[in-house]
Amino acid sequence: MKENLFEIIKDFSKEKGLDHEVVIKLVEESLIQAAQRKLPYNEIEGQIDEKTGKINLSHFKEVVEIVEDSNNEISVEDVEQIDPNAGLGDEVEYEISDREFLRIAHSTRPIIFGSLKEAERQMVVSTFTDKIGEVLTGNVIRVEPNGRIAFSFQNKVEAYLFRREQIYGENFTFGDHVRVLLLDVNDNPHKDSQLTISRTHPGLLIKMFEMEVPEIFDGIVKIVNAAREPGRRAKISVYSTDEDVDPVGSCVGMRGSRVQTIVNDLNGEKIDIVRWSEDIDQYTCNALAPAEIESLEIDEEANQIDVIVAQNQLSLAIGHKGQNVRLASKLIGYKINIVANE
C-alpha cells in the first residue's frame, strides 16, 4: 500500500515534469495531516524513503511520572524497557504500524492527490507567468462537444481554447501543432484551465510578425498597432527607424513569403500592412488604402474623422460589410465617417 503510493507519486511527478523534491515534501505534509485527523497522537512525523519507496510515519510519547494519556505519554518505569537512556520530559519515537496506516488510507489518497494537483498548479504558475503575452505552440489533444479545444503544452500542461478565442471557420484535429497567444495565467485552483489562450487577439498577429520579420525582431522596423476581424481581415501599421529599410516591404517579404506564412497560420486571414505616419491625415489615407481619399476633416474633441471620397471609391473605402473602415478606425484610434463627394 505504502510502496504503491510512492510509485503513483513518482509517475505523476515524471509525467507532469514536477520538481520531485517539492512533490515529496507536499506528500509528506499531506500524510501527516491525514494521520493527525484519524489517529489519536499529538505529534506525528512522516518521511518518504526515496531509495526504497517506503512511507514512514511515526508518533512520539513524552516520558512522564504519571500517565494520563497513554497514546501520547509513557511512564518512567515503562520507558526503561524501550530506551534506558530516556529520562523525564524526553520524547520516545514509535513507528505507526501498517494496521494503523490502513485506518488513514481512505482519507490519505484524496489528500495526496490534492497535494499533487497543488504542486502541478504551482509549477504552471512559475513556468508560464513570465510568458504572458508570448506565443506558445501547443498540440491539439481533443476537440470537445461544446466546441472548446484542448491543447497540451510543455510538461503536458493542458489549456482550453474556448470558442470566443477561436478563429471563425478554423478546424483542428488531434495532433495539430497550433500557435496561440498566452493572455493570462490563473492561480485559481477551481478553474478548468489555468492558462488563458487566444487565436483572435491582435497581440497574436503582432507577435507573429516579430517572429517572421527579422527587421522587427532587431528593432529596425517598429509595429505601432494592429486591428483584426479574426480569420477574415487585419491591418497592422509599421514604420522604420532606418530610412534605407522599407517597413512595408520588410513585412511582406520576397514575393510575399513572410506575410503569407502568417496568413496561412491564421486560416487565410488577409493582412493589410499600413505605413504609419505622424501626420494623422496621411496615416488615415494609408489605413483606408486602396481607396483614394479626396479630403478629410478631423474633429479632435469628438475623436472623429470625416473622410470625403469620390462616388466610385465609396464601396472600396467602406469595404465589405464595412470591414475596411472598421479596421482602419481601430488602427488609427479615431471614428471614421466615409462620405461620398456629390
Image (cartoon, grey):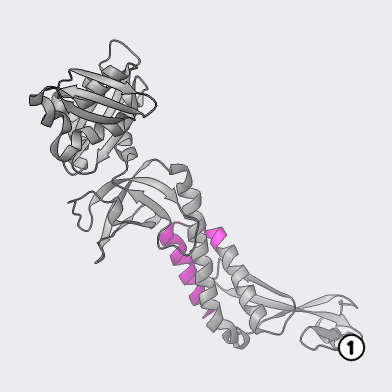
Specify the quadrant of the image occupied by residue 216: top left
* Residue at 71% from the left image edge and 85% from the top image edge: 40
**Image height of 63 relative to 271, above or below:** below
Depth check, front residue: 131 or 81 = 131
* Residue at 57% from the left image edge and 68% from the top image edge: 27
Say which residue label 1 marks.
77
Res. 250 visible in picture: no
Identified by mark 1, the residue type is: Glu
**Image height of 231 relative to 273, above or below:** below
Total marks drawn?
A: 1
Q: Position of residue 135 (x, y in %)?
A: 35, 42
* Residue at 17% from the left image edge and 17% from the top image edge: 294
Q: Residues within 10 Å of mark 1 (few under 14, many from 20)?
A: few
Depth check, front residue: 34 or 197 = 197
Q: Position of residue 278 (x, y in %)?
A: 34, 17
Question: Dominant secondary structure of the magenta stretch?
Answer: helix
Q: Residue 12 in magenta?
A: yes
Specify the quadrant of the image occupied by residue 132: top left
- Element under label 1? helix
Q: Residue 257 in magenta?
A: no
* Region in magenta: 1-23
Depth check, front residue: 339 or 281 = 339
